[in-house]
Structures are given as C-alpha cells and as structure tokens.
C-alpha cells in the first residue's frame, strides 16, 4: 500500500465510524488474533465468513455466525474483507 492509500483509508474510516465504533473494531480484530490465530487486519466475522465459504468452519465458527445473524442477516458473509 502506498502512503496515500493508507492516509485515504484512515480518513475514510474516521469519516465512516465514530471513535467508539473504531475501538470496538480494534477489539474485534484483537479477538481474531488471540482466539482464531487470524490476521490483525481482519475481524472475527470476516475470518469466520471466509472459513464458512471455504468449508473449513467448525461448530464454534458456525454457532457464532448463527448468533451474529440475530444482529444482522448474512453478517459473516457480508463482513468478508473487513
């Protein structure tokens, strides 16, 4: 990523999300690293969504995604890439 792309992403995120929401996203990304050994740049929902699509999801992944569906239909699948 170029410097300009990083600055653009930062400005986009600040405009899109308030400070509290950005903090919750950081916690989500931290849980992805600690509990799923995932990327620090990806949320748990995105990680699980990719695992479901690839057929690698376990029962815990599927149960968490089913719970998140109560908050937003297709949450895990829609979160891929976040």
Image (cartoon, rainbow, N blue to C red):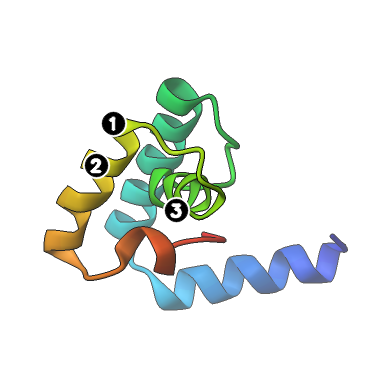
Which residue occupies the foreground of this view, 50 or 15? 50
SS under mark 3: helix
Which residue occupies the foreground of this view, 31 or 3? 31
Q: Which mark is residue 60?
A: 1
Give the left or right position of residue 54, taking residue 14 as reference. right
Q: Position of residue 60 (x, y in %)?
A: 28, 31
Q: For the point 43% across and 45% down, which residue is it?
A: 48
How packed mark 3 is, by other alpha carbons closer than 10 Å (few <14, some 14-19, many 20 or more), is many
Determine whether label 2 and label 3 are within 8 Å by CB.
no
Q: For the point 60% across and 37% down, which residue is it?
A: 39
Q: Is residue 27 above or below residue 23?
A: above
Mark 2 and mark 3 lie on one chain; the one further toward the N terminus is 3
SS under mark 2: helix
Q: Which mark is residue 82?
A: none
Q: For the point 11% across and 61% down, which residue is it?
A: 70
The N terminus sits in image quarter: bottom right
Determine whether label 1 and label 2 are within 8 Å by CB.
yes
Q: Which mark is residue 49?
A: 3
Q: Is residue 23 above or below residue 27?
A: below
Q: Position of residue 54 (x, y in %)?
A: 56, 49
* Residue at the spot of label 2: 64
Distance of label 1 from label 2 (alpha carbons): 6 Å
Which quadrant would residue 40 be assigned to in this image? top right
Give the left or right position of residue 34, taking residue 40 as reference. left
Mark 1 and mark 3 lie on one chain; the one further toward the N terminus is 3
SS under mark 1: helix
Q: Position of residue 32 (x, y in %)?
A: 45, 34
Give the left or right position of residue 3, taking residue 31 as reference. right
Give the left or right position of residue 37, taking residue 77 as reference. right
Q: Position of residue 12 (x, y in %)?
A: 56, 76
């Amino acid at each position: 990523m170029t410097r300009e792309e990083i600055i653009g992403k930062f400005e986009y995120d600040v405009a899109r999300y308030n400070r509290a929401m950005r903090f919750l996203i950081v916690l989500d990304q931290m849980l992805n690293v600690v509990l799923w050994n995932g990327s620090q740049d990806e949320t748990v929902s995105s990680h699980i969504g990719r695992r479901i699509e690839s057929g690698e999801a376990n029962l815990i992944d599927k149960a968490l995604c089913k719970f998140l569906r109560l908050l937003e239909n297709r949450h895990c699948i829609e979160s891929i890439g976040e």
